[in-house]
Image: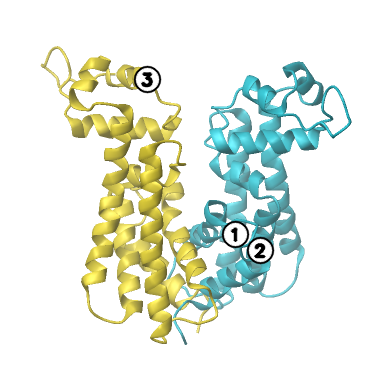
Chain colours: A cyan, B yellow
Amino acid sequence: MTTAKPGRRGRPGYDLESLLTVAVKLFNERGYDGTSMEDLSKKLGITKSAIYHHVPSKEEMLRLAVDRALDGLFAVADEVADGDGPAIDRLERLVRGSVAVLVERLPFVTLLLRVRGNTKVERAALARRREFDRIVTDLVKAAEAEGDVRPDVDPAVTSRLLFGMVNSLIEWYRPRGGASGDELADAICKIAFSGLRRG
Amino acid sequence: MTTAKPGRRGRPGYDLESLLTVAVKLFNERGYDGTSMEDLSKKLGITKSAIYHHVPSKEEMLRLAVDRALDGLFAVADEVADGDGPAIDRLERLVRGSVAVLVERLPFVTLLLRVRGNTKVERAALARRREFDRIVTDLVKAAEAEGDVRPDVDPAVTSRLLFGMVNSLIEWYRPRGGASGDELADAICKIAFSGLRRG
C-alpha cells in the first residue's frame, strides 16, 4: 500500500503533488465529506503528521485540487477574452480549451463538478464556477448580437447546455482507449454549432 | 420537524410516498452512503421501527427511488421503440420525453445520476442506465443509416453528449421561476439537431 521504490526503505517519498493525486482519487471515490484524514493516511501508508508536513488540512487539499481545475478553465477564458475575432469563434475556442482542460486534469475537474457548497472552500469554488458561467453566457450573447447565433434560445440556457455536454465527459470519458481530447472537442463543436441533422 | 397536520396529535402520518420524498431529499443533500437510518429517523421525526413498518431497509428505499426515475425513462424509450417514423424523429421524441421525466421526477433522477455502484441496487441501476444508453446509441445509428444524421460523429459519443445536455438539468434547473420542461426540450432539440450557428 506504500509507493516506496524497490530497494528503498522507510517512509515512502511523497511530495505535495503525489499526495494530492492520491487524495483527489479518494475524494472522488468516497466523496470529500466521506473521506477522513485517517482514511487518507491508511491509503498513503504514512502517518497523519507526515501528511500535515505537506499540507495543513483536508480542506486545504480540496482548495489546491479544485483550484487546479479552475485555474485551467480561467486561463482558457482569459486567453479567449484577450483574443480577437467574432464572438462565435471565441466561444468555440473556449469550448475546445475547456475540453482540453477536462481531459488533462480529469480527476481535478471531476472533484470540482461534484462540490456541493458545504464548506468555505466549496462555496468559493461554486462562486468561481458561476463567474465562469457568466463569461460563457456573455460570449453567447455577444455572438447573438453579432448575428452568428440563433436568437431563439436563451443565452443563459444555451451556455448551461453547451457546458452540460462538455462537463458530461467526467461521467463517461476514459483516457485510455477512448477518443482523444481533440476528437471529443470536434464532436462537441460539430453538434453544438452545426447540429446533428444532416444539412 | 414533523409534518403532523394542525389539530392532529401523535405520530405524523407518513405513507411510503411521503417517506420516500424526504429520504430522497436527504440522500441528495448528504449522499446515500452519508445518510443513516438514524439521520432519516431524526429528519422525519419518527422512530426507525416506524420507518421499517413501511420499508425493510435503506437500500430498498434507494431501489424504489432510482426505479421511479428509470421506469419513467424506459416508458419513454418503449413508446418510442413501438412508434413509427424516421429514427431522427423518434430520437427527438426520446429526448423530449426524457426531459419531461427529468423535470417531473427531478429528485429521483438526480439520485439516479449520482449512483456510483457501491451496492447491489446501485449496480443494477447502472446496468439499466447502460441499457438506456444503448437504446439512444442505436437510434442515432439508425438515423445515420437513414441519412438524417451527419456521419462524421461517432454514434456512442453523440448519444453521450446528447444526454450530457439533458442530464445537466439536474445541476442547474430549478422548477420554480425557470423555463418550463417544454421550453427546455425545445432549446436542447434546437441546439442538438440544428446547431447554434445561424443559417
Residue at 55 percent across and 80 percent down: it is B152
Q: Residue B126: which disc?
A: none
Secondary structure of the residue carrying numbered label 1: helix
Residue found farthest to the left? B7
Residue beneath disc 3 = B39
* Residue B72, x across and y down, in percent: 26, 53
Give me the chain letter of mark 1.
A
Three-letter residue code for mark 3 = Asp
Q: Residues within 10 Å of mark 1 (few under 14, many from 20)?
A: many
Find the distance from the CA under tag 1 to the CA under tag 2.
8 Å
Residue beneath disc 2 = A94
Three-letter residue code for mark 1 = Val
Find the distance from the CA under tag 2 to the CA under tag 3.
43 Å
Residue at 46 percent across and 71 percent down: it is B191
Secondary structure of the residue carrying numbered label 2: helix
Of residues B132 and B17, the one drawn nearer to the viewer in this rendering: B132
**Quadrant assignment, res B88:** bottom left
Residue beneath disc 1 = A136
Residue at 76 percent across and 23 percent down: it is A51
* Residue B169, x across and y down, in percent: 42, 53
* Left or right of B11 in this view: A79: right
Q: Are marks 1 and 3 on the same chain?
A: no
Secondary structure of the residue carrying numbered label 3: helix
Foreground: disc 1 or disc 2: 2
Residue found farthest to the top? B10
Q: Are marks 1 and 2 on the same chain?
A: yes
* Residue B104, x across and y down, in percent: 27, 50
